Amino acid sequence: MRPGGQPNLQQLMKQAQKMQQQLAEAQAELAETEVTGTAGGGLVTVTIAGSGEVKSVKIDPKAVDPDDVETLEDLVLAALHSANDAVRKLTEQKMGPVTGGMGGLGLPGF
């Protein structure tokens, strides 16, 4: 801080630009990463990109019972939830160090 308690605007801008670059790098890395979620002991497996895009759904033939479609639907839903949870955790891991530093800028709301 400069005399009078005013933040150095140039320093704040440099920090903001650095954080923006780190954020873009983290987002690019997330988009390239894929995670999987499973349900039913591996009967259903869902692969999702770090960006949230569903890449694939694999269903073991043992999970297919024409008389019990509801269980298969539940397994697919559970696998999607599992994969989304993995994406959320990965996002927190990758973005936390970048966004966690925003408080040091002295900006309101961060």
Image (cartoon, rainbow, N blue to C red):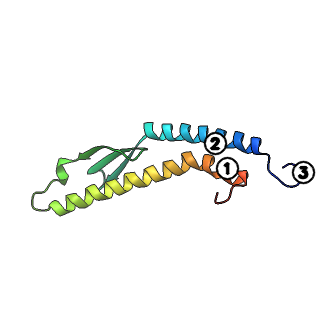
Instruction: Tell me the element at label 2.
Output: helix
Amino acid type at circle 2 is Met
Residue type highlighted by circle 1: Gly
Query: Going 72% across and 52% down the picture, which residue do you hit?
Result: 104
Which mark is on residue 101? 1
Which residue is more in the foreground, 6 or 77? 6
Task: Please identify, in this view, whether the residue under mark 1 or under mark 2 is nearer the observer.
Answer: 2
Q: CA distance from mark 1 to mark 2?
A: 8 Å
Nearer to us of marks 3 and 1 is 3
Q: Which residue type does callout 3 highlight?
A: Pro
Q: Of all residues shown, which one is farthest toward the right?
A: 3
Question: In the rendered image of this protein, does residue 74 appear above or below residue 33?
Answer: below
**Mark closest to the chain's N terminus, 1 or 2:** 2
Q: What residue do we see at 71% from left, 51% from top?
A: 105
Percent across and percent down for residue 22 are: 60, 39
Q: Earlier in the sequence, mark 3 or mark 1?
A: 3
The quarter of the displayed image where residue 78 is located: bottom left
Number of numbered labels in the structure image? 3
Q: Which residue is mark 2?
A: 19
Query: As drawn, which residue projects farthest toward the left?
Result: 67
> In which quadrant of the rendered view does residue 39 lie?
bottom left
Q: Which mark is residue 26?
A: none
Tags 1 and 2 touching, CB below 8 Å = yes
Question: Which residue, given by chain and number where applicable, does mark 3 sit on?
Answer: 3
